[in-house]
């Protein structure tokens, strides 16, 4: 693996290596990235990704340079290729959060250094890796589990999750209206009725109904997706020991209710912390 632009870049053995390395590096200070400078570029807002990668790099002895798209000359029209060519000359990896997945492909095309997708409109591979790691941590297995995603099935986080679940034999159900079906190829079933979908689920997952960049459609999306809210009535229909995940930021009492995100089934805080642990493994694997 040279870059991590998509879950498609990962083999099963890459992910297994990431999980093993995560266990090894968790809570450890190392010097694997000593003398390395890693550039992070954000075209969209971020709390977890920005901070977890920065802390991961620091804990591995490296230096993180965190930049917003608009404070770079990119914001004034310098091309992505020219920017990437300069940055890869200074640094040892580029981590970017962008709107268009194709912008990541353009960066990777000119960069000899590894490029990592920190979220695009299409995918969020680092999130999916932390999600699967969390599920494995809690359930002690992956194969045969049933995960049900509720809400906007055409979103970045779920796209990456579908692909990763497929690699590990996790049965994936999307519960969403027709217009909100996933936009990627992959192995999943659609069960539109959320009450039917969550039956016997091991894992319940939701994400915002309005992803970054979709704000103009907010009112319509909230209307269309209202009945997919992850609330205690739905949780009761899943397995007794079902776990609830959300990548965060959550819109409380919109896609998930307070009593579910703060309730006993929720593992969202472990999930968020695992971003840090799994990203250390991703960095170790990619940066030589
Ligand atoms: N889950 C996630 O990527 O969060 P941020 O948008 O805060 O980085
Ligand atoms: N689907 C959300 C994920 C945020 C981490 C978004 O793109 O806004």
Image (cartoon, grey):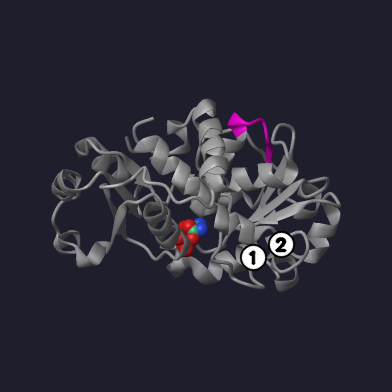
**What segment is highlighted magenta in the picture?**
166-173
Position of 14 relative to 239 (above/below): above
Mark 2 Cβ inside 8 Å of ligand 2? no
Q: Residue at x 77, y 46 (%)?
A: 202
- Report whether residue 154 is seen: no
Q: Position of residue 258 (x, y in %)?
A: 70, 72
Residue topped by disc 2: 230
Name the residue: 80% across, 65% down: 232
The 10 Å Cα crowd at callout 1, few under 14, some 14 to 19, many 20 or more, is many
Dividing the picture into quarters, in which one does residue 194 lie? bottom right
**Is 223 situated above or below 200?**
below
The part of the image, by quadrant, that contains residue 142 is top right
Asked if residue 243 lies left or right of residue 218, the reply is: right
Which residue is at 64% across, 60% downward? 268
Query: Is residue 172 found inside the magenta-colored segment of the image?
Result: yes
Coordinates of residue 253 in the picture (x, y in percent):
67, 73
- Residue plotted at (61% across, 37% down): 165
Magenta span includes 88: no
Choose between 177 and 135: the one closer to the eye. 135
Q: Quadrant of the C terminus?
A: top left
For the N terminus, the image quarter is top left
Q: Position of residue 161 (x, y in %)?
A: 57, 43
Q: Secondary structure at mark 1?
A: loop
Eyeballing the image, is 258 above or below 28? below
| Label 2 crowd bin: few (<14), some (14–19), many (20+), radius 10 Å | many
- Whether residue 102 is visible to the viewer of this picture, yes or no, is yes
Q: Position of residue 198 (x, y in %)?
A: 78, 50
| Circle 2/circle 1 CB separation < 8 Å | yes
Taking depth in this image into account, of 122 and 53 the one nearest to the observer is 53
Give the structural element (helix, strand or loop) at label 2. Answer: loop
Residue identifier under label 1: 255
């Amino acid at each position: 693996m040279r870059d991590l632009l998509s879950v498609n870049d990962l083999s099963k053995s890459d992910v297994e290596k990431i999980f093993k390395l995560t266990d090894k590096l968790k809570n450890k200070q190392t010097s694997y990235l000593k003398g390395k400078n890693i550039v992070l570029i954000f075209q969209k807002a971020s709390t977890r990704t920005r901070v977890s990668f920065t802390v991961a790099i620091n804990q591995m002895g490296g230096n993180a340079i965190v930049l917003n798209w608009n404070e770079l000359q990119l914001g004034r029209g310098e091309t992505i290729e020219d920017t990437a060519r300069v940055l890869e000359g200074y640094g040892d990896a580029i981590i970017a959060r962008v709107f268009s997945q194709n912008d990541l492909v353009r960066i990777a095309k000119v960069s000899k250094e590894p490029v990592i997708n920190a979220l695009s409109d299409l995918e969020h591979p680092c999130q999916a890796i932390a999600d699967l790691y969390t599920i494995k941590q809690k359930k002690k297995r992956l194969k045969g589990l049933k995960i049900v995603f509720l809400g906007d099935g055409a979103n970045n986080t779920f796209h990456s999750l579908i692909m990763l679940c497929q690699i590990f034999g996790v049965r994936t159900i999307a519960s969403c209206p027709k217009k909100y079906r996933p936009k990627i190829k992959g192995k999943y079933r659609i069960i539109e009725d959320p009450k039917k979908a969550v039956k016997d689920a091991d894992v319940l997952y939701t994400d915002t109904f309005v992803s970054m960049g979709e704000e103009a459609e907010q009112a319509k999306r909230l209307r269309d997706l209202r009945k997919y809210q992850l609330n205690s009535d739905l949780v009761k229909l899943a397995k007794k020991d079902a776990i609830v995940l959300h990548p965060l930021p959550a819109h409380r009492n919109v896609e998930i209710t307070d009593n579910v995100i703060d309730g006993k089934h929720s593992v969202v805080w472990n999930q968020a912390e695992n971003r840090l642990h799994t990203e250390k493994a991703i960095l170790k694997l990619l940066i030589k």
